[in-house]
């Protein structure tokens, strides 16, 4: 994954940072964006075709969770096979990936850091190291960091200040996250038109 400003290309397109990062050019450039006035992002968005809207939502989803195209497509194909609302099953599958949980429960400052914590073997599931970011966590499972073995990571995790959604039970002192239940779409702290993403892949 490219670091630095280049990866914020999608943020410039949508007018806000997809990862809520303070160093995003959309944060510094906010005044200029508004100075452009009515010719700004709203005028631009109206010009999108139906295809363009589906594509943009798909790209937003991919970017926020830093998924590859083939990973997201595989998750869609999985969701399609399961009985129920495909968009909801797709979003639940993405949000219960180990890297997503480490990020959204507030144990890593970014999704990129979350992926690194997992691949560098700092994250445990039910007491055992899991180094696969795509590992799907089930309700009832507990994710943790061993502060003695990973003191620097523990320090970083404790310093992240966000309100975790209610489907996580977070203990910052003990560095434990319990997935309480599968998330509903509305509870996930990232706004995306998931139906558009399903439509994109169903074309
Ligand atoms: Zn950004």
Image (tube, rainbow, N blue to C red):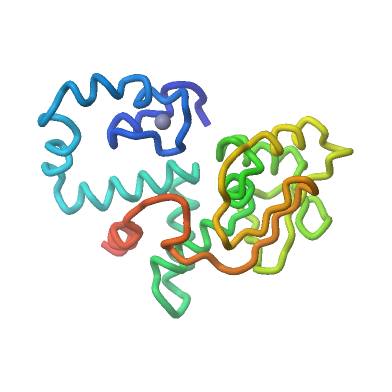
Is 37 above or below relative to 85?
Answer: above
In which quadrant is the C terminus drawn?
bottom left
Q: Position of residue 140 (x, y in %)?
A: 70, 68
**Is residue 46 toward the left or the right of residue 90 in the image?**
left
Q: Position of residue 180 (x, y in %)?
A: 64, 66
**Is residue 142 toward the left or the right of residue 186 in the image?**
right
Depth check, front residue: 77 or 111: 111
Q: Give the residue furthest to the right.
A: 148
Residue at 46% in and 37% down:
19
Q: Position of residue 128 (x, y in %)?
A: 82, 55
Residue at 65% in and 56% down:
135
Total labels: the figure holds 0
Residue at 82% in and 36% down:
150
| Ligand 1 image-quadrant field | top left
Depth check, front residue: 83 or 111: 111
User: Would you identify the image quadrant in which residue 107 lies?
Assistant: top right
Residue at 30% in and 24% down:
30
User: Would you identify the image quadrant in which residue 90 lies?
Assistant: bottom left
Q: Position of residue 13 (x, y in %)?
A: 28, 33
């Amino acid at each position: 994954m490219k670091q630095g400003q280049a990866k914020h290309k999608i943020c410039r397109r949508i007018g806000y940072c997809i990862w809520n990062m303070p160093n995003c050019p959309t944060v510094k450039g906010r005044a200029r964006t508004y100075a452009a006035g009515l010719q700004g992002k709203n005028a631009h968005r109206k010009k999108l075709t139906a295809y363009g809207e589906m594509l943009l939502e798909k790209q937003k989803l991919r970017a926020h969770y830093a998924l590859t195209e083939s990973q997201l497509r595989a998750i869609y194909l999985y969701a399609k096979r399961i009985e129920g609302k495909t968009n909801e099953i797709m979003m639940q599958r993405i949000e219960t990936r180990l890297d997503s949980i480490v990020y959204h429960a507030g144990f890593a400052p970014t999704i990129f850091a979350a992926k690194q914590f997992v691949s560098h073997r700092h994250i445990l599931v039910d007491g055992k190291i899991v180094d696969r970011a795509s590992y799907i966590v089930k309700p009832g499972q507990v994710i943790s960091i061993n502060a003695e073995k990973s003191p620097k990571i523990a320090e970083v995790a404790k310093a992240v200040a966000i309100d975790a959604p209610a489907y996580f039970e977070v203990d910052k002192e003990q560095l434990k996250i319990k997935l309480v239940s599968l998330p509903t779409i509305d509870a996930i702290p990232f706004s995306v038109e998931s139906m558009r993403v399903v439509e994109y892949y169903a074309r």
